[in-house]
């Protein structure tokens, strides 16, 4: 008799393990072979050996290597053999990403790579667990990247993600993503008229949503009336010099780089003048 299994596959904590030992000799019929763990030897926690030579279970202990002595006996000939084999158990998969960035309706989400450790170290698939869903407009790639542009209403969404490694080990973890209102410019797009040579009544443009802290305002299209300027703080001021009707686009950016744009109109009207006239002399 001799044990022909030369080595055992690697196992992973928390993942199903199974392999069948093999031998030769004796009566030569495997159904007559009876397997056992030799006295004084042990298996990793969670594993067991059947009389048919099936080593299986789900490792529950710590990662490590256990040298186990296996024996096989042929019930017909009475012959037996033994071999000491290493049973290596590695750490199971753990998803290590814990929190995800806030998203804003209408703004590209900060693409986030989910991460894991343990298992085979090569993660073949990331996916949403059955019944889970991301906020509208976002998606999870098989490489574990959350991306997209939120399109729904502001809300907090919880979901469960599953990762599978190249050895078919899996792990799951629950996450939540909060989507807040996107930036919007709230000032009326029809601005007060101005007059050549007269200081314009300063207007401070306003916005809402986003982070609530607006880092800059800028004109991105069209042109302001000559003599007017828009500060980075959103203040429109100055003294117009040329009459006419003007249209221009303004963009606001918050501290999280979310943006919103609006097109404004402003008319610079001619200044009222009184022209002296000769009056008839009263007699």
Image (cartoon, rainbow, N blue to C red):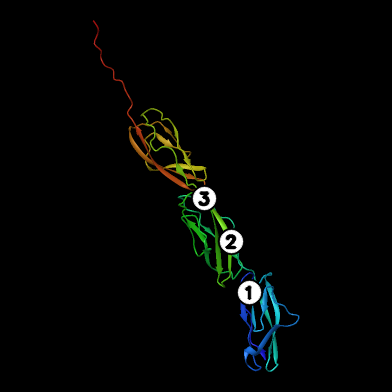
The image shows residue 25 at horizontal and vertical percentages of: 65, 92
Residue 266 horizontal side relative to residue 113, left or right: left
Name the quarter where the C terminus is drawn: top left
The image shows residue 77 at horizontal and vertical percentages of: 68, 94
Q: Nearer the viewer, mark 1 or mark 3?
A: 3
Label at residue 52: none
Q: Establish if 206 lies above or below 57.
A: above
Q: Establish if 84 lies above or below 277.
A: below
Q: Are marks 1 and 3 in contact (CB under 8 Å)?
A: no
Q: CA distance from mark 2 to mark 1?
A: 21 Å
Residue farthest along the right direction in this orientation: 40
Which residue is more in the foreground, 64 or 135?
A: 135
- Disc 3 is placed on an element classified as strand
Could you tell which of marks 2 and 3 lies nearer the N-terminus?
3
Q: Residues within 10 Å of mark 1 (few under 14, many from 20)?
A: many
Q: CA distance from mark 1 to mark 3?
A: 41 Å
The image shows residue 203 at horizontal and vertical percentages of: 44, 33
Residue drawn at (70%, 83%) of the image: 36
Label at residue 11: 1
Mark 2 = which residue?
Answer: 173
Q: Establish if 207 lies above or below 283.
A: below
The image shows residue 272 at horizontal and vertical percentages of: 32, 24
Q: Quadrant of residue 205?
A: top left
Mark 3 = which residue?
Answer: 155
Name the quarter where the N terminus is drawn: bottom right
Residue drawn at (44%, 45%) of the image: 260
Q: CA distance from mark 2 to mark 3?
A: 20 Å
């Amino acid at each position: 008799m001799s044990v022909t299994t030369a080595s055992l596959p690697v196992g992973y904590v928390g993942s199903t393990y199974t392999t069948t030992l093999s031998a030769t000799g004796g009566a030569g019929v495997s159904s007559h072979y009876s397997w056992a763990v030799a006295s004084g030897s042990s298996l990793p926690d969670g594993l067991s050996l059947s009389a048919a030579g099936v080593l299986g279970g789900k490792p529950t202990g710590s990662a490590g290597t256990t040298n186990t002595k296996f024996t096989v006996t042929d019930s017909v000939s009475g012959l037996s053999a033994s071999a000491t084999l290493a049973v290596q158990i590695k750490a199971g998969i753990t998803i290590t990403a814990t929190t995800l960035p806030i998203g804003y309706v209408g703004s590209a989400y900060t693409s986030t790579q989910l991460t894991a450790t343990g298992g085979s170290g090569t993660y073949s698939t990331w996916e949403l667990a059955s019944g889970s869903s991301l906020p509208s407009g976002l998606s999870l790639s098989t490489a574990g990247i959350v991306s997209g542009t939120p399109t729904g209403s502001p809300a907090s969404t919880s979901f469960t993600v599953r990762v599978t490694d190249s050895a078919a080990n899996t792990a799951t973890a629950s996450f939540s993503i909060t989507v807040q209102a996107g930036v919007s410019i709230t000032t009326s797009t029809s601005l007060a008229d101005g007059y050549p040579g007269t200081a314009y009544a300063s207007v401070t443009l306003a916005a809402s949503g986003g982070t609530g802290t607006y880092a800059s305002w800028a004109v991105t299209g069209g042109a302001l009336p000559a003599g007017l300027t828009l500060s980075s703080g959103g203040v429109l001021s100055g003294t117009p010099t040329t009459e006419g009707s003007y249209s221009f686009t303004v963009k606001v950016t918050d501290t999280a780089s979310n943006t919103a744009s609006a097109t404004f109109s402003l008319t610079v009207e001619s200044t009222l003048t009184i022209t002296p006239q000769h009056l008839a002399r009263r007699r």
